[in-house]
Each structure stands twice: as structure tokens, then as C-alpha cells.
Amino acid sequence: MAERPPPSETGKGKGLHRSATLVLSAAMVVLGLAILVQTFAAGGGPLALGTVLGLLFVGAGGGRLYFTWRGL
């Protein structure tokens, strides 16, 4: 009797996971940019907490997008 592959190995499951990763990664980039805009609009400098967090969100989201598109 043949075993069924796990959902992550089927085409539909992989496509859904990849799509969700792309959407959430893009949301992280947008959120990071919004944090940066809000921080600079409020007069924050380059070492303000909002600047650091915004850059981290943009970097993490951008990195996830890059590696998801590359398939790594």
C-alpha cells in the first residue's frame, strides 16, 4: 500500500506556502517602510528606535522575498 506524501510535498501545499510567504514578506517590507516614514516625520534621527526597527523589518522582509523568489 502506497503512503500519501505529506501536504508540504504536494504541489498545492507548496504553492499555498510560497504564496503566503510572499504576501507576509511584502507586508513586512511595507510595515518597515511605514515605521521609517513615521519615525522621520516625527523628527527621529538615524539611531532612533523606529529607524532601527524599520530597517530591520525592511531587511527581513526583503531577504525573505529574495530567497523565496530564488527558491533557496
Image: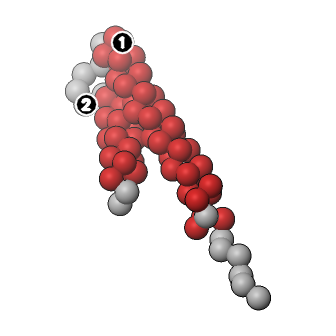
Query: What label sits on residue 11 in the rendered view?
Result: none
Query: What label sits on residue 42 in the rendered view?
Result: 1
Which residue lies most toward the right here? 1
- What crowding class fits label 2: few (fewer than 14 Cα within 10 Å), some (14-19), or many (20 or more)? few
Tell me the kind of residue under disc 2: Leu
Query: Which badge, 2 or 1, comes first in the chain's sequence?
Result: 1
Q: Which corner quadrant holds the C terminus?
A: bottom left
The x and y percentages for residue 12 are 62, 55
Q: Which corner quadrant holds the N terminus?
A: bottom right
Q: Which of 27 and 2 is in front in this view?
A: 2
Vertical placement of 6 versus 67: above or below?
A: below
Tell me the kind of residue under disc 1: Ala
Q: Which of 41 and 49 is in front in this view?
A: 41
Query: What label sits on residue 47 in the rendered view?
Result: 2
Q: Is residue 33 left or right of residue 25?
A: left
The x and y percentages for residue 48 are 30, 28
